[in-house]
Image (spheres, rainbow, N blue to C red):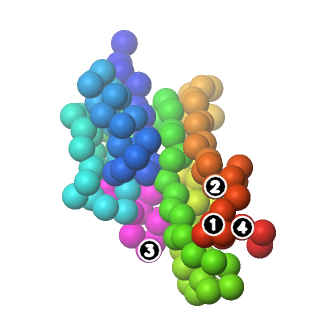
Amino acid sequence: MAKPLIVMAGASSGIGAVTARLFSARGPPLLLLARRRERLKGGPALPRPLCRRVAVAVEEAACEVEKRFGSTDAIINNAGMMLLSRIADQPVDERDRMIGLSIKGVLYGTRAVLPGMLAGGNGTLVDVSSLAGRTRSPEVVYGW
C-alpha cells in the first residue's frame, strides 16, 4: 500500500513547521507550501514557496505532486498571518494581505486537491484557525 500524500500549507513556522517535521519523520510524501521557502524543512518533501499568484501556485504544485504520488489523502490548511496594529492605524493593503492568506489560502488549497479526493472517494481536510478570533487585545485587528 502506498503511503498517503499530505499537503501542508503554512509549513515554514509555528504549528505548521512542527507538524511538517512530525509527518516527515513518518515518511509520507509531503507537499509543503509556505511564503518563505528557505524555512521549509522535511524529509521526502516537495517545498514550494507561495507568491502573490497563490491560487495558480497551489494548483500547479498540487497537480505536479499528484502526478507523482496520486491524489492527496489529506490537506492541512494552516497558512495565515496576523499583522498586529490598531485598526485605525493599519493600512488597507495590510488587511488585504491578511484576508488573502488566511481566508483565500484555505479556499485555494482545498480547491486544488478536492477533485482528486472526490474522485477517489476519500480525503481529509484540516483547517487550522487563529487564536486571535477568541482573544481580545488592543493590538489585534478585529471587528471588520
Residue drawn 34% across the image and 51% down it: 12
Assess whether mark 4 and mark 1 are in contact (beta carbons under 8 angstroms): yes
Question: Residue 136: horizontal and vertical position, in percent?
Answer: 70, 58
- Which residues, given as a range, are shown in magenta? 48-61
Q: Determine the CA span between mark 3 and mark 4.
A: 24 Å
Between circles 3 and 4, the one closer to the viewer is: 4
The numbered mark, 3 or 4, whose residue comes first in the sequence reads 3
Residue 32 is inside the magenta segment: no
Pointer 1 residue: 140
In depth, the one of 70 and 41 nearer the eye is 41
Of the numbered discs in the image, which one, if any, rests on residue 132? 2
Disc 1 is placed on an element classified as loop
Question: Residue 60: horizontal and vertical position, in percent?
Answer: 40, 57
The numbered mark, 2 or 3, whose residue comes first in the sequence reads 3
The numbered mark, 2 or 4, whose residue comes first in the sequence reads 2
Pointer 4 residue: 142
Assess whether mark 4 and mark 2 are in contact (beta carbons under 8 angstroms): yes
Between circles 1 and 3, the one closer to the viewer is: 1
Assess whether mark 1 and mark 2 are in contact (beta carbons under 8 angstroms): yes
Q: Quadrant of residue 26?
A: top left
Residue drawn 62% across the image and 26% down it: 121
Q: Determine the CA span between mark 2 and mark 3.
A: 24 Å
The type of residue carrying mark 2 is: Ala
Residue 57 is inside the magenta segment: yes
List the single residue furthest toward the front. Answer: 138
Question: Residue 110: horizontal and vertical position, in percent?
Answer: 58, 48
Left or right placement of residue 88 versus residue 109 in this view: right
User: Relative to 57, is 25 above or below?
Assistant: above
Q: In the rendered image, is residue 62 in sight?
A: no
Quadrant in which the N terminus is drawn: top left
The numbered mark, 1 or 3, whose residue comes first in the sequence reads 3
The type of residue carrying mark 1 is: Val
